[in-house]
Amino acid sequence: MARNAIISIIDNEDSIRSSVGSLIRSAGFSVDLFCSAESFVYSTNFSETVCLIVDIQMPGMSGLELQSLLVKSGIKIPIIFITGFADPSIRKRAMDGGAVCILDKPFQSDNLIKCVERALNASVDAM
């Protein structure tokens, strides 16, 4: 997968969104940042996204609701969830919905990059 493919980051917390975006850019990827799932869904780069990094709990549409919407729409974008709430039932729901990884905040940078690589490999396999 080309490093110029867009990885979209969705988190309502500015500091998380910004720091994750900087990390992913430093690894050589193109990044789009969104403060909500709704802003991602209505964005012009929606169709160019090859991987999503999404907070599970956000105001409005949650990360899990976004995942469900994409699955129901037949849109296959690998998702990495990040969360400050490690509830086992939420983890199970995310993984059952096809999540590539679930990382607890705070997470190690290396772990996120490994998840991105796994997600991009899954994206290539789905093509």
Image: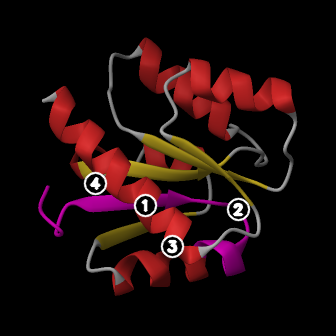
For mark 3, give the secondary structure: helix
10 Å crowding of disc 1: few (<14), some (14-19), many (20+)? few
Q: Gap in Å between the C-alphas at discs 2 and 3?
A: 23 Å
According to the picture, the residue beneath numbered tag 4 turns out to be 45
Is-magenta flag for residue 4?
yes
Q: Amino acid at mark 3?
A: Asp
Left or right of 61 on screen, residue 49:
left
Colouring scheme, one of rainbow, by chain, secondary structure, one colour:
secondary structure
Placement of 73 over or under 1, stated as above or below: above
The answer to which of marks 1 and 2 sits earlier in the sequence is: 2
Residue 16: percent from left, percent from top: 67, 74
Q: Amino acid at mark 1?
A: Lys
Residues drawn in magenta: 1-17
The answer to which of marks 2 and 4 sits earlier in the sequence is: 2
Residue 85: percent from left, percent from top: 86, 48
Residue 26: percent from left, percent from top: 36, 86
Q: Tell me the mark number nearer the camera, choosing from 1 and 2.
A: 1
Residue at the image point whose x is 38% and y is 17% from the top? 73
According to the picture, the residue beneath numbered tag 2 turns out to be 12
Q: Amino acid at mark 4?
A: Asn
Left or right of 20 on screen, residue 27:
left
What is the number of the mark on residue 110?
3
10 Å crowding of disc 3: few (<14), some (14-19), many (20+)? few
For mark 4, give the secondary structure: loop
